[in-house]
Amino acid sequence: MDTQAAQRVAHDGGADLFGVCPFVTSQSVLQGKWAILILHHLAEGPLRFNELLRRMDVAQGTLSKQLKNLEHEGLVRRTVHTDGPLRVEYELTDIGLKFRGVLDAIETWGNDYIEFLRTHDGDDVR
């Protein structure tokens, strides 16, 4: 969003910035404690619900709710396979796959921050 657009939105009484500001839009779509971790696991390829559950230390209901939200936002696709035993797989959509670059950047920054924490052992960084 350019500066003029931001000023117009602010002038209009702080109208909803979803779909206008990329940061507000991203923050809204990625709501939930587990959203980024789910996207990280699905970036490796399609996974079944129980496989995701095994990879994460999260309650079944919480995972289900997060997956439904990510599906609603268009980042995750839920596919029900009826050939043979019924199974459900989750995978990233085309727009979800575009998040992989962001995941790589988060991993790099996270590793840098972990190193920062190690070098500031005992310092009050929180």
Image (spheres, rainbow, N blue to C red):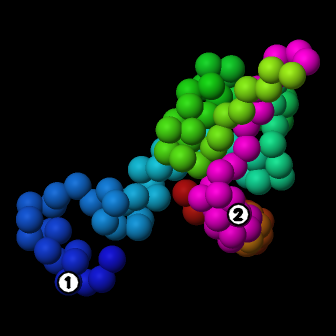
In the picture, measured across the screen, residue 110 lies left or right of residue 86, that is left
Instruction: Indicate which disc, 1 or 2, sits on the residue closer to the N terminus.
Output: 1
Residue 20, given in percent of the width and then of the height, sits at 31, 66
Please state if 17 lies on the left or on the right of 72 as rendered: left
**In-image side of 98 versus 85 (left or right):** left
- Quadrant, the C terminus: bottom right
The residue sitting at the left extreme is: 12
Please identify the residue farthest to the right as the structure is shown.
84
Q: Is residue 125 above or below residue 86?
A: below
Vertical comparison of 107 with 61: above or below: below
CA gap between label 1 and label 2 equals 30 Å
Answer yes or no: is residue 25 visible. yes
**Which is nearer the eye, 13 or 20?**
20
Residue 4 image label: 1
> Was residue 89 drawn as part of the magenta stretch in this picture?
yes
Label ID, residue 100? 2
Quadrant of the rendered image containing residue 96: bottom right
Q: Could you say whether the residue bearing mark 2 is in a helix, strand or loop?
A: helix
Name the kind of residue labelled 1 in the image.
Gln
Magenta range is 84-107
Which amino acid, by three-letter code, is at mark 2?
Arg
25 versus 84 height, above or below: below
Residue 98 coordinates in the image, percent (x, y): 64, 64
Find out whether residue 108 is within the magenta segment: no
Picture residue at 41% right of the left edge, 65% below the top: 23
- Residue name at image x 68 percent, y 22 percent: 59
Query: Which corner quadrant of the image does residue 103 belong to?
Result: bottom right
Q: Residue furthest front?
A: 83
Q: Crowding near pointer 2: few (<14 within 10 Å), some, many (20+)?
A: some
